[in-house]
Amino acid sequence: METTSNSKVKVCNISELQPGQTKSLKVKDKDIAIFNVDAKLYAIDNMCIHAGAPLSEGFIDVEKCQVTCNWHSWVFDLSTGKCVSHPRQDVFSGTYPVQVVGDEVFVEVK
Ligand code: FES
């Protein structure tokens, strides 16, 4: 893993994260899940905010761009981190900007 300026960390090459694939990894002190949903990349905290399940092992809904935790079925919007299945409107998982430069995938973690 290679750190560049302004908090961007190279996490993999795009060939390692094809559409439909998910990768979990530690970036700095964060446990992050990166999802390739229909060729768009999203990064959120891997640990579910409910009880700690790895969201990287959840079910992906490509059309809604959501992941469903496989322990108790909380559903998270991958672009915003919002828990859309929770009755409260202010329940979010952390999200991180993802950038592809050439063949390299970078995640920004501050
Ligand atoms: S641990 Fe994810 S919904 Fe309970």
Image: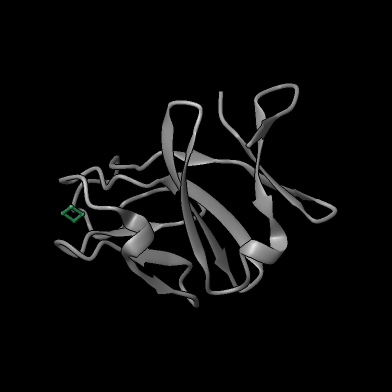
The image shows residue 2 at horizontal and vertical percentages of 68, 33
Looking at the rendered image, the quarter that the C terminus falls into is top right
The image shows residue 6 at horizontal and vertical percentages of 71, 22
Can you tell me which quadrant of the image ligand 1 is in? Answer: bottom left
43 on left or right of 48? right
**Residue drawn at (22%, 66%) of the image:** 70
**Residue drawn at (61%, 41%) of the image:** 97
The image shows residue 21 at horizontal and vertical percentages of 52, 69
70 on left or right of 21? left
Q: Nearer the viewer, residue 35 or 93?
A: 35
The image shows residue 55 at horizontal and vertical percentages of 33, 56
Q: Number of marks in the image? A: 0
Q: Nearer the viewer, residue 83 or 15?
A: 15
Q: Quadrant location of residue 16?
A: bottom right
102 on left or right of 90? right
Q: Residue reaching furthest front?
A: 1
Q: Quadrant location of residue 45?
A: top left
Looking at the rendered image, the quarter that the N terminus falls into is top right
